[in-house]
Amino acid sequence: MNVPSAKETTAIPLVIFNASEPQPRKAEIMIEFYELAATDDKQVFSPYCWRIRLALHHKGLPFKSIPWRMTQKDRIAFADTERVPVLVDGEQKLADSWKILEYLDERYPTPSLEMNRAELRFFRHWTEMVMFPGMIRMIVDEIHKTVHEKDRDYFRATREKTFGMPLEEFAANKEAKLEEFRKSLNPLRATLKAVDFLGGSQPNLADYLVFSGLMWARCTSPMPLLAEEDSVFAWRERMLDLFDGMARSIPCREIN
Ligand SMILES: N[C@@H](CCC(=O)N[C@@H](CS)C(=O)NCC(=O)O)C(=O)O
């Protein structure tokens, strides 16, 4: 997992396709989606990839999941990137989760992700700049145990270089950090006491962005991040139930 940076990604280059073309019929679509997986191909755990997985389900788009590991840079070099998510849709080869979301919403407008809504940018940046950093300092040692064994040395070396200390040291004092993390969710908690989803009566991209972060922890760490009586926990249950329990069916390490 990369360390979220406070710098917004630069302007999004226009994706080249003819927007006036009609939305293709679902049977004609064959999207290939490269996502980060643990040893078990089905244990997909990247929060950036989860955004895309949820958006594809939101739009009811069929896709082929291609499990990828961090040390397989050559397999995604065709998309001019070293990171996932990568999405291939016919001639289109796309990297970067936000660009992929924008592409999907332009190419397959119905149902919309409403990418033009400014507050979604807030949720993107809040997850990347507040939520992910609050989580990684509790779970990075467990992520190390979760990644495919051929990724373990790479993961340790790159993350220890970033954090400037051993993973176990970076992830120490989990209990104190957990309390702080739970407090950081207060605005989310207060909101979810009043509504079923951040999108209102139905989930929208704001829900997917936040939930993707929680799936990262759920899939990689045994530590329960949320207390069962928490309104955020109840919302997460509703999210786990979406799309016929798609997220619930993903192998996870969380013990509840
Ligand atoms: N800004 C990128 C971040 C993608 C990213 O950091 N992906 C991680 C997985 S969560 C990755 O591929 N890491 C590979 C590595 O660290 O070498 C996006 O939004 O797609």
Image: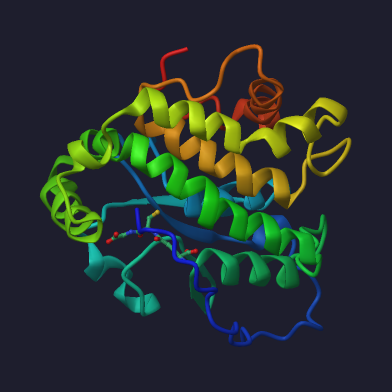
**Res. 252 in view:** no
Residue 171, image x, y percentages: 28, 36
Along the horizontal axis of the image, is 108 left or right of 152?
right
Residue 225, image x, y percentages: 49, 25
Seen at 46% across and 20% down, the residue is 224
Q: Return the residue nearer the eye: 19 or 127.
A: 127
Is residue 96 shown above or below 203? below
Q: Return the residue nearer the eye: 43 or 155.
A: 155
**Res. 219 in view:** yes
Along the horizontal axis of the image, is 7 left or right of 158?
right
Q: Return the residue nearer the eye: 230 or 2.
A: 230
Hey, which quadrant is residue 227 in on the image? top right
Is residue 197 shown above or below 128? above
Along the horizontal axis of the image, is 210 left or right of 218?
right
Residue 58, image x, y percentages: 72, 47
Is residue 235 shown above or below 216? above
For the rendered model, the colour scheme is rainbow
Seen at 47% across and 30% down, the residue is 250
Is residue 150 shown above or below 29? above
Seen at 69% across and 60% down, the residue is 122
Hey, which quadrant is residue 117 in on the image? bottom right
Along the horizontal axis of the image, is 109 left or right of 5?
right
Residue 241, image x, y percentages: 67, 25
How many badges with numbers are in the image? 0
Seen at 45% across and 60% down, the residue is 85
Question: Splitting the image into four quadrants, where does ligand 1 fall?
Answer: bottom left
